[in-house]
Amino acid sequence: MSGSTITAGRLELMLAELRLPTVRRLAAQVCAQSDREGWPAHRLLEALLEHELAEREQRRLERHRAESGLSPDKRLSGFDFAAVPSVSKAQVMALAEGHEWLERGANVLLFGPPGVGKSHLVCALGHALIDAGRRVLFTRCSDLVQRLQAARRDLRLPQELAKLERFDLLILDDLSYVRRDQAETSVLFELIAERYERKSLAITANTPFSQWGEVFVEPAMTLAAVDRLVHHATILEMNVESYRRRSAHAAQPARRQVASDAAEPV
């Protein structure tokens, strides 16, 4: 066995021990290039470590995206801002690109009837934040409330709330579908209060604040929840016709034409 083979084997073992899989995979290739081109030692080391750091960052983004629960295909590039003229594209892009609001624990609230793109837009914002290195969790509001309610029954609510601390943005989709139940709405209020001015929330709802009495049992709790949410918030009103309804209406003439053509005698 040659000395170079032994050296390569030792290098493999050391890189495995140091948990540098990218350097281990690319070392032979990059070292050969370095020998051909006469790189100084610091350039070789820099090239190898740049590859390692880049792939670590990519793996980190993949993990954060996988844990986020976001729909993979709902991105800002696919959102039709022209269909929702009440929403400023510049304002949404500012939220996606400037993260000072996350540092303040500010919120984003999206209102509008079903089918206007609230979930798409908030998911797209979540993806942009993950791309920028932030951690995001998307969940149906009713699902999270039930999870927190079960944790309270098992005397684990503080621990369950603590698990959510690692997320810079917690997206609660469809708040309007939470049941008007004392136990459920009290844990929802506790979540809102826990994150107030510390960690950001993004909430979608089909109903305006004036109808949130249908979610929270007590008027005082409704007012307190709204007060905490809007204190530092960007509110996006999406009161346009449902995208699904528009698509169905647009498809009707085509369906009628197909039916007419099928009915004509041959």
Image (cartoon, rainbow, N blue to C red):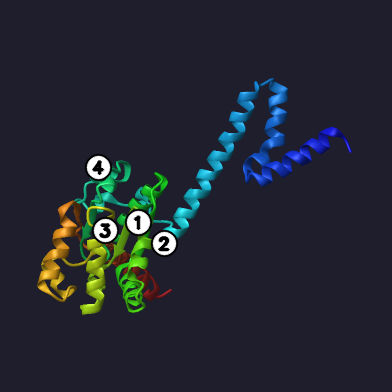
Measured Cα–Cα span from mark 4 to mark 1: 17 Å
Q: Which mark's residue is nearer the viewer, 4 or 2?
A: 2
Which residue occupies 49% across, 52% down?
A: 62
Name which of mark 3 and mark 2 comes first in the sequence: 2
Q: Which element is circle 4 on? A: helix
Q: Is residue 148 left or right of residue 3?
A: left
Q: Amino acid at mark 4?
A: Ala
Measured Cα–Cα span from mark 4 to mark 2: 26 Å
Query: Do residues under tags 4 and 2 come within 8 Å of each other at their CB atoms?
Result: no
Q: Which residue is mark 4?
A: 90
- Front position in the image: 180 or 12: 12
Q: Please identify the quarter of the rendering in which residue 190 is found.
A: bottom left
Percent position of residue 261, x then y = 38, 70
Which residue occupies 30% across, 72% down?
A: 145
Name which of mark 3 and mark 4 comes first in the sequence: 4
Q: Which element is circle 3 on? A: helix
Name which of mark 1 and mark 2 comes first in the sequence: 2
Figure quadrant of the N terminus: top right
Q: Residues within 10 Å of mark 1 (few under 14, many from 20)?
A: many
Q: Amino acid at mark 3?
A: Arg
Q: Residues within 10 Å of mark 3 (few under 14, many from 20)?
A: many
Name which of mark 4 and mark 2 comes first in the sequence: 2
Q: Which residue is mark 1?
A: 123
Q: Is residue 134 visible?
A: yes
Q: Amino acid at mark 2?
A: Gly
Q: Which residue is mark 2?
A: 69
Measured Cα–Cα span from mark 3 to mark 2: 20 Å
